[in-house]
Image (cartoon, coloured by chain):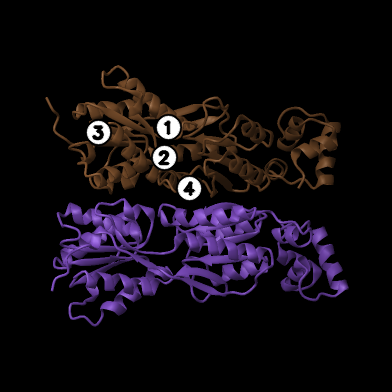
Chain colours: A brown, B purple
């Protein structure tokens, strides 16, 4: 299938010029316009941009790229994206990038050629090159949660650094005297910000040592393994801030299997606020992100971009909230 | 965009004939072939079928329609579909039908026009009309888990009726004397078969009464509410077979909040075998479906159909397994 590059080459103009013709924005002289139109016809070029720009017709479809649908955080967020999309007459299709850059590229290729109006990226593998390609194809997009900070685009995420400080403060307030951290993949911005927030909050305590930080890859079994490793290394630790709820559910299970009482011996605080956090025994204290609001805001921004109502690129950072439950509810020692 | 019906109308032939031309199977005389080819050119008809049939080119994309991505059962199954698809060079896009027929129709519309090689349906809202449309468009598809029995297509599911009997038998063997059932939506075949399996297993006991069956809609909160309702109605019940693990996790939580000991006072058995079932406290006994095998088999069948290696429609029913854990581990009374 012909790409915008093929059209540009055949017409002897730049990709940007083809894009201007397709979307009727910016000045293009009539002769150039004719060349581009002829190239489009010759190549039977029919991307989304044509459907939207020339025929003035939208497809009513947006794509949501998720990094890992087995983490309930993402289905909960997807719920909001779908609700808002639907209210506005759009259908959502999903892609599961599995945190792999290569898979994400192939999704982008597929989507660019398949009459999609816009894309919400909730994965962290988006590269500057991908951003450039989407801009060339004039596909509106919004980045949700995991975006790199250096990309020029609209971003919706929550206050991860502040949330981590909040978690550590809470654990200290309930009497913990040695607080560890289980962190997510460090190429994921929220995981990195939570780790930095933890480090900043504990680094001046006499008990602090770097071996209190253990990776857990944001998954159930990663959380279990990390909790076991921490307890073996620091049998005297009495609090764990876990970088997401899924790992925290795994950590709780590992502690109970080791015969360690939660919260009496070790208090546990998660991050995310997924509904499963309330199903554990003991129920899990967590730093709740406004999951639904995040998804809804991303979908609204995308639809505004698609419909031409907003163009600016901004980072929207939403507040997080401490939800204290049984897993940290213990007598403070004095 | 032109449809296969438009092509048939313009060429003055049946849709089946157009399909035969597109896919080069079955006999079509040369004059008819020319008429169809001319109609395709005139209408610039370019569906998937053209890409596959005439140009001999596949898109390398299949779609997976899921009924509810917030139930971890489906992401786990999707994992297998993706793995097999990827091994064979296909990318998977996901659709979340939310158990709504209308949403599913609009996905089908979108997919038929977007260069998809085939579709795996894991939702129960597929109607005979949809099946007809996909056959007209010559889109291969396979139905996973929730299909209606009266559809003419390939189906992969597990032995739900037998699994339910297995669950009841296990609860009786660990000493339960009054076993209730929380069931899923009755328009979903596996939910219906599990309910029938329960009913068949208990109907001859003196303690059996229809009010021991309570709906729970396959969700966490549905399971919680159903367990509360059952305990209020039958404070003496001592076993619950819950129609899926997600509701069982909710039921466990509701029982613990009511101060009821699991398994000592009430034993609980779920259905599905999702990995979260092992994270609860007590850990959940369940009837495990071969989730990964189901997804993998569906993807393999679909790819074989796409590649023309298999045409037959068959129901593949896979075995289930009892996984006994703490939630039913109690002394048998004699």
Mark 1 burial class by Cα count in 10 Å: few <14, some 14-19, many 20+: many
Label 3 lies in what chain?
A
Question: x and y percent of residue A31 in the render?
Answer: 86, 32
Residue sitting at 39 percent across and 40 percent down?
A291
Q: Is label 2 in a helix, a strand or a loop?
A: loop
Residue tagged 4 = A82
Q: Secondary structure at mark 1?
A: helix
- Does dot 3 land on a helix, a strand or a loop? loop
Q: Is residue B256 above or below residue A305?
A: below
- Percent of width and height locating residue B121: 53, 62
Tell me: residue B2, above or below residue B181. Answer: above
Residue under label 3, please give it.
Answer: A235
Q: Is residue A122 above or below residue B68?
A: above
Q: Which residue is mark 2?
A: A218
Label 4, secondary structure: give it: helix
| Label 1 with label 2: CB-CB less than 8 Å | yes
Q: Which of disc 4 and disc 3 is earlier in sequence?
A: 4
The reply to whether residue B69 is in sight is yes
Which residue appears farthest toward the left when viewing the image? A334
- What whole-number distance in Å separates the C-alpha atoms at marks 1 and 4? 25 Å
């Amino acid at each position: 299938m012909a790409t915008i590059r093929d059209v540009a080459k055949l017409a002897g103009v730049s990709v940007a010029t083809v894009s201007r013709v397709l979307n009727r924005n910016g000045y293009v002289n009539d002769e150039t316009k004719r060349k581009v139109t002829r190239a489009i016809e010759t190549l039977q070029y029919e991307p989304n941009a044509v459907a939207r720009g020339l025929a003035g017709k939208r497809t009513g479809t947006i794509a949501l790229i998720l990094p890992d649908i087995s983490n309930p955080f993402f289905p909960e967020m997807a719920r909001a994206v779908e609700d808002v999309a639907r209210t506005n007459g759009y259908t959502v299709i999903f892609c599961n990038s599995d945190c792999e850059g290569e898979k994400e590229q192939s999704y982008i290729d597929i989507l660019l050629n398949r009459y999609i109006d816009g894309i919400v990226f909730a994965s962290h593998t988006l590269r500057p090159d991908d951003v450039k390609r989407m801009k060339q194809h004039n596909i509106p997009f919004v980045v949700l949660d995991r975006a790199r900070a250096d990309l020029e685009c609209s971003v919706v995420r929550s206050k991860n650094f502040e949330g981590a400080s909040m978690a550590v403060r809470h654990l200290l307030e309930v009497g913990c005297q040695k607080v560890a951290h289980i962190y997510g993949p460090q190429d994921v911005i929220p995981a990195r910000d939570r780790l930095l927030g933890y480090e900043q909050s504990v680094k001046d305590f006499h008990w602090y040592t770097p071996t209190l930080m253990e990776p857990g890859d944001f998954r159930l079994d990663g959380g279990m393994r990390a909790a076991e490793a921490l307890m073996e290394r620091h049998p005297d630790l009495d609090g764990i801030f876990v970088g997401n709820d899924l790992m925290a559910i795994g950590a709780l299970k590992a502690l109970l299997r080791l015969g360690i009482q939660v919260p009496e011996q070790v208090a546990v605080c998660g991050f995310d606020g997924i509904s499963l956090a309330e199903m554990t025994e003991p129920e899990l204290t967590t730093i709740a992100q406004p999951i639904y609001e995040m998804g809804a805001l991303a979908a609204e921004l995308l639809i505004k971009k698609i419909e031409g109502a907003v163009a600016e690129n901004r980072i929207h950072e939403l507040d997080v909230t401490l939800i204290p439950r049984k897993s940290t509810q213990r007598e403070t020692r004095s």
